[in-house]
Amino acid sequence: MLLWGAGCFLWHYSGALALLLALPAVHGLYYVLIRLIKRFTPWSADFSWLWTKNLPWNGYLPEGYIRNRFLLSIHMHLLLTGAAIIGAAYIWVPVPVFATFMFVHIWTLLPRLWILQQLKQVHPHGLIKITADELLLYST
């Protein structure tokens, strides 16, 4: 992340400034999208969500047990919808700002998606619980 910030600063100062804004803005976008998914998906209202600060699981995440398929589906929705929203802003923002937002978006979600995909191969119908130190997979 620091290398990207240094590269953006050398490219144009707006990219380096966007790096300071991108992380909270991208997590705010995720918050809004997850709240919309919770509102319009009837079987998702049972889960409580909270903010966490632990990498790679920082941001708005489920507090209790959640199905691996459901969490993977939510993260795929976040990846595609977030990329579409950031891509739509390409017309109005400078290229370094757009590239920085897209980098932060992908940098945040790809490790999560990779881990969830690996867990899906281990046990496709398992339950996941995210704690401060670990990611737990329970078979059902």
Image (tube, rainbow, N blue to C red):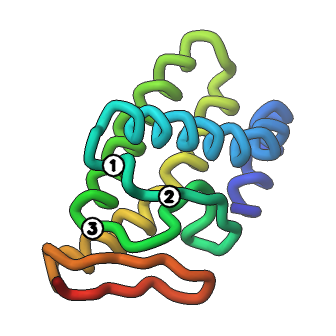
Report the side of 129 relative to 17 (left or right). left
40, 118: nearer the viewer: 40
Residue that badge 3 annotates: 67
- Compared with 100, 84 (above or below) is above
Residue 100 makes an appearance in the image = no
| Left or right: where 54 falls relative to 75 | right
**Which quadrant, please, contains the C terminus?**
bottom left
Where is the N terminus found, in terms of image quarters?
Answer: bottom right
- Mark nearer the N terminus (2 vs 3): 2
Question: Element at badge 2?
Answer: loop
Instruction: Specify which label sits upstream in the sequence, 1 or 3.
Output: 1
At horizontal 44% and vertical 32% (from top left) the residue drawn is 36
Query: In the picture provided, is 20 more to the left or to the right than 66?
Result: right
Count the marks.
Answer: 3
Question: As shown in the figure, which amino acid type bears the numbered disc 1?
Answer: Ser
Q: Which residue is mark 2?
A: 48
* Above or below 131: residue 64: above
Element type at mark 3: strand
In terms of secondary structure, where does tag 1 sit? helix
Residue ID for mark 1: 44
Residue occupying the point 27% across, 69% down: 68
Dot 1: within a 10 Å radius of its alpha carbon, few (fewer than 14), some, or many (20 or more) residues? some
In this rendering, position of residue 111 left or right of residue 49: left
Q: Quadrant of residue 55?
A: bottom right
Amino acid at circle 3: Arg
Crowd tier of the residue under label 3, counting other residues whose Cα lies within 10 Å: few below 14, some 14–19, many 20 or above = some
Does residue 51 lie above or below 19 as drawn? below
Q: Marks 2 and 3: which is nearer the front?
A: 2
Please name whichever residue, 59 or 80, is drawn nearer the observer in this view of the structure.
Answer: 59
Marks 2 and 3, how far apart at CA: 13 Å
Q: Residue at x 62, y 41 (%)?
A: 26
Q: Amino acid at mark 2?
A: Ser
